[in-house]
Amino acid sequence: MDFKLLHITGRDNDFKEAVMETARGKAKSILHSAEKKRAKALDEARSHCAEANHDLIAAKYIRRTEQNFSSVAQQKRRELLLYRNELVKDLFKEVSARLADLAAGKEYPAWLLARLEGHSLPTGKGVEIALRTADMPHAAALEKALPGCKATPDDSIKLGGFNLRLANIRYDDTLDAALEDGKRAFFARSRLSV
């Protein structure tokens, strides 16, 4: 499916940049805070080591401090991952809402016809157009555009679009598939595998 249909406007690019910038800022803040705590703990460890068994006490204290720092850093990374995951979920909720708006809009029937006409399909019997139940009122127009085909409801389609079936061939032109393709492309480009 051509994901250009869901053209991302400058506002959406700004949103993506804001999400990335917020995540980067939070990451820097978390790491800076952890480094400050580590430095403070190391300074405390050094000040306690002024006693008789300096080397032994210092090594023990430093080892404990580093273990604590590793634990804190791991916890902060986990918090950052959860925060980033929430940002990505919010982003795709927004995309899903826009797709739902498209499917509810007055241009949607024309979009369905244009998508169907964009396929090189033989006319005649055997071609099945699977639509979500809410799109069945558009079935007659689609059947007219592709004579001999039959439109059937398909509850697996949630957002909109259609599946074309001809013998053993199936073409998925649903908004659901477009959203999944968009997610994969987003994660590949952004390197935000969460």
Image (cartoon, helix red, strand yellow):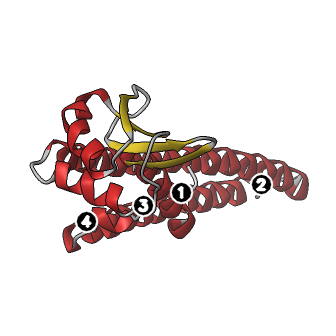
SS state under label 3? loop
- Residue topped by disc 4: 12
Q: Amino acid at mark 1?
A: Arg
- Residue topped by disc 3: 119
Reading the chain from its start, which is encountered first: label 1 or label 4? 4
Residue 44: image tag: none
Q: Nearer the viewer, mark 3 or mark 4?
A: 3
Visible residue check, residue 109: yes
Q: Amino acid at mark 2?
A: Ile
| Image point (27%, 60%), residue name | 114
* Label 3 close to label 4 by CB (< 8 Å): no
Q: Nearer the viewer, residue 122 or 99?
A: 122
* Label 2 close to label 3 by CB (< 8 Å): no
- Residue topped by disc 2: 62
Viewport quadrant of the N terminus: bottom left
Q: Nearer the viewer, mark 3 or mark 1?
A: 3
